[in-house]
Image (spheres, grey):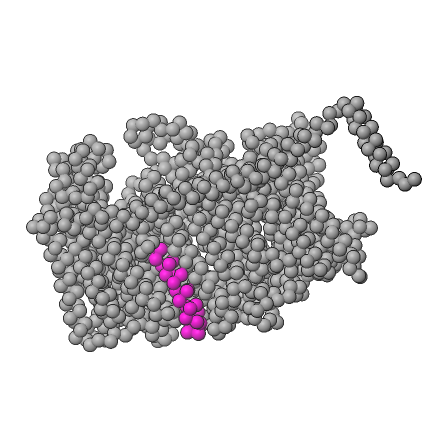
Amino acid sequence: MESLVWLIPLLPLAGFALLLLGGRSLGEPNAGKLATAATGASFAVSVLVFVGLLLLDSHDRSFTFTLFSWVPSGSLSVDVGFLADPLSITMALFVTGVSTLIHIYSLGYMHGDRDFSKFFLYLNLFVFSMLILVLGDNMLLTFLGWEGVGACSYFLIAFWFEDEANATAGKKAFVTNRVGDFGFMTAIFWTFFAFGTLNYSEIFADAGSVSTTTASAIVLLLCLGAAGKSAQFPLYVWLPDAMAGPTPVSALIHAATMVTGGVYLLVRVNPLLAAADSWVPEMIAWVGLATAIIAALAAVAQMDIKKVLAYSTISQLGFMFVAIGVGAYTAAVFHMVTHAFFKALLFLGSGSVIHAMDGEQNMSRYGGLARLLPVTSITFGVGWLAIAGVPPFSGFWSKDEILAGAWNHNRLLWALLLFAAALTAFYMSRAVIMTFFGERRWGAGTADDSTAHHPDESQTAHSPGASAHVHPHNEPPALHPHESPPTMLLPLVSLALLAAVAGVINLPFVKDTHFLEKWLEPSLFHNEASLNFAGGTKWVLAGVAIVAGLVGIWLAVSIYLRKSMPASMVERDFFARAWRYDEAISAVAGGPGRKAFSALAFFDHKVIDGAVNMVGGAVQVSAKQLRRLQTGMVRSYALGIALGAVVLLVYFISRASF
Amino acid sequence: MGYLSSIFSGSATEGSLFASVSVPDDVSVGFPVLPALIVIPLLGALALLAIPASRSELLRPLALLFTTATAALSFWLIGAYEIGRNVELFQFVSHHEWISSLGISWHLGVDGISLFLVALCGLLFPVAIIALDPDHHPKSYYVWLLVLEAGCIGTFLALDLLLFFLFFEIVLVPMYFLIGKWGHDNARYAAVKFFLYTMLGSAIMLVGIVSLAFLHAAQPGNDLTFDLVEIASAQSLATTTARWIFLAFAVAFAVKVPLFPLHTWLPDAHTEAPTAGSVILAGVLLKLGTYGFLRFGLYLFPEASVYFAPLFLTLGVVGILYGAVVATMQRDLKRLVAYSSVAHLGFIVLGLFAVTTESLEGSVLQMVNHGLSTGALFLLVGFIYQRRHTREIAKLGGLQRSVPLMAGIFMLVMLSSIGLPGLNGFVGEFLILVGTFSAHRWWAVAATIGVILAAVYLLWAYQRVFHGGGAGWGSGTNAAGGVTAPSSADNAAMPDIRWREGVALAPILVLIVFLGIYPRPVLDRISPAVEDLVQHVETHVEGYDHPSVGEGITGVGEAQGDSHSETAAPPATGSHTPELP
């Protein structure tokens, strides 16, 4: 059954092609249904391939299916070939699964949009590209998927392109990712140079025999690429802005799937990481940690519910990077899967809230929605408990594995990561309380926000006229939050179930329940770091992690529900503006950067072209001077001839020897 | 069917009527395909001249007929070109005595390198004719276009130095008139600049050609000849002399490409030329320069090319980065596309002078790719100009709402130009960079930065032209109640792609996708010619060896940065392409 692997990406591609040809005439909802069916079928095939692999012996679980030769040139030979191994099929399963659910959700969410079918066209193209990314059997094919998802992300962030802010956000995402791609591309060149091939299995077979420097260089460059795609420091700036896209896009691309591409890539090349200098994975771990903390602190002070989730995604991806850095690859994949479930759930839940609140995204205008949106609030609650690390929800198990890996590697790393975990529990609790509990801060008469601490927000609150202009939804005539349609609730419920129980795929109790670890083993080539502490320590660590999560929740409850502490204590302006990092980059790019570009354009126009025109001018001027000799008057010519004759005569006479 | 499958499988056409055209001398068997490719457009020009002014409606169909016939023949050539072992590199050779006292002959031939450039010519001329009509003097417009086509194809096919020079120069005349007569406001300035600039370069090349032939003849045993193959295989010049003569050629090609800092004629000529002129200028004429570097640089002067490679690699990289930066700041959409050509051609030059199999194949492929994507971009800009009578980016905006189809097409072409994998631009760019990396690592790394910049200037331009158009767009008032620019109403009322514009673009769009996914039919035909060229360079350049990849895994030769320095060269493995590990 594993030979069906080529069908997995091809089905969404077929969906894309059909929508390209007839999407507009299919219209709503048939275009969406077609796209959903294509993705669903792809999920079904993924399950078949998964079962096929499962039936094989664990060391045989690697199957390559080559379609055709893509780029044959000189000693380079790159095929379009798909690799079905435990890692790629794990990815394919959750990518197609979550995608199908989000397609269903979008049927409701995008209802009435004038580009309804185009939205699904992009979604199918995205799913295709993502599957190429994870199933490609060589680096170049992975890069094709990598760029494909980037392009789809660009299309979908700028989906509502009439608004300049959305268009700018899309462009920013693409360009920032291209900075990462510089790393990925250079890594591909270097790999080909060092190994003479781009095929994963051939590279891994020789990974041990390249020099450490080569392996380190390749991994560092790949890491730059991964940092772009997976929104790690210093390239994470595009992800918060990417929230400009429709919410299903945020859930699918910017939370569950595409942004895990970098994590996938680094897990995939684990033999190269093993061959690199030890400071390289060390650096990956610390970059991940820095990202986790920076983003978590930024999330603490966000007022836009999607921005909270965006920074949370960056932070959670940081956790996965830490896992890779400490060699806990299984934990990274585990967290990637559980995160896909609970973060997609949270985004879709936030979409349901935004839908109910008529487009409002500012949490300071939410409150008390739990009773009005029962399904949304319960499912969102499950997602909250999962991400906060409350047992037995899925996030607890995966995060605990990462923390254990960090403890195993470096105690300071563990302590700081624990802090990030506590922050996670805090900011998510804050978001849940501000949205679903407390007093209603919406509807007529309740529009003045007592809880707005964001400087911009308080400004608008003080000048109602301006705020009505900026937020058209500020004081709607009558706001009646209502539960979303079934197409949106079904995915919420499904994801909530998954987010609740997904921990079972890798339970820590006994060796036999490490299903994921055993399953992934063939893809990890024994590069997984082994834990070198007693089983008892693991229980203590888990206990500490639970306490940290509870502290975070308790703090949020005290501040936002009981109001026993002022919110200004944590909602720092500095955090709300995300460390002013983005502003600084924009300032440099828009200031000196732009000036430098202009200066070069000026140089081209004035100096280089100026020189050309000067030469031309000089020729013209001298020609004009010379032209004066050609006056057209026969007498002056005659004079010239006479003078010349005289000169010649004098010359010959002087030379003559008598 | 058998014919088609031979294209896709890449196997040689067996039993073809033209299978035996490898006869080197005067006799060519069967129908003279290559002369026909030059003669058909010329006949078309003559036929058009004969049409009386009263029947001017016949001009376009007739021009289309002749260019389409040329196109069909050039596509047929791709299928009929044989690949595989034991076939001649130059096929369909047409070799006749011409001015035998001076050793000048009519010598045409096609190999995998010129094959696709000829086909590109064949494609772009009918496309340009379908897409847009001239706004005045249609007769002379089409006549000049047909003469131009004959000149371009002739340049790619000529295997005699003087014949090549003749075609190379002939091309200037119709282009000069096309720019000057049908161009925009500043057309005469641009036309004169174009003509003089390139003329100056070719004058120096003529000196080079003549001295090369006479110096070659001065060697014992050589006759006076201008035959490219003969002179190139003899390699009878002294090293220093050859370097000087190479430089004489290089100036002409560098202007034509154009290489930084000789590029400033290009933005003027491209911007002022009529749309068809820009399409041909970017699509075909610039390739005369890169093709020249390949055929009359690397092939004719392998040692000098390798010797001067660092200079040209640097100029290539500078062109990539500089062109991109300057493109970013352009206010005129057409000028922006013109500067993007400077960057793209920089990649091609980089690949040529890196002299590896991969980079050379990438360069040849990229010549075709650039012709397709930049040709299409100029067409699209032309369509916008035709509708809006402006190319100023600031006056456009929100077009994705009024012309969604055009926006989608622009997006596809733009992504090809950016080098998105899955589209044609990527394959060429990737091969150039991966090949260059194995020979000249840091140049490749610097050039890769250009990949970031390409996204910057094109996406920014796309955003300003196609995105936007929110509340109040086109109605004269914006959301804040203010009056929007009058241009907004024009943008909103813009009609989308018309059917004949779609017909013109369709083949390009299909190729953009096809060559991105399945470039093999092209690469399979380019590769024998390129491998032969690399072999030629290895034979004639002491100390040059094709850089080998996969050395890293044995732990030796890994930091082999400069492959043609004598110390770093690994022992030759017998085959010029190293074995896979």
Q: Residue furthest front?
A: A658
Q: Is residue B290 left or right of residue A117?
A: right
> A643 or A278, which lies in front?
A643
Q: Classify A473 as above or below A86.
A: above
Please name the residue shown 56% across and 65% down the image: B563
Identify the residue at the far right of this view: A658
Identify the residue shown where x is 32% and y is 39%. A163
Classify residue B27 by image quadrant: bottom right
SS majority, magenta = helix
The residue sitting at 55% across, 68% down in the picture is B568
Residue at screen point 38% across, 74% down: A60
Q: Position of residue B581 (x, y in %)?
A: 51, 72
Confirm whether residue A458 shows in the render. yes
Up-down relation of residue A5 to residue B35 (above or below): below
Identify whether A637 is placed above or below B375. above
Q: Position of residue A198 (x, y in %)?
A: 46, 65
Q: Is residue A604 left or right of residue B225?
A: left
Residue A349 coordinates in the image, percent (x, y): 21, 50
Image coordinates of residue B219 in percent, x first then y, are 78, 59
**Residues in magenta?**
A203-229
Q: Nearer the viewer, residue B150 or A500?
A: B150
Image height of A419 relative to A62, above or below:
above
The quadrant of the rendering that contains the N terminus of chain A is: bottom left
Compare residues B127 and A304 and report the one nearer the observer: A304
Asked whether A221 falls inside the magenta stretch, the response is: yes
| Any part of residue A49 in sight | no
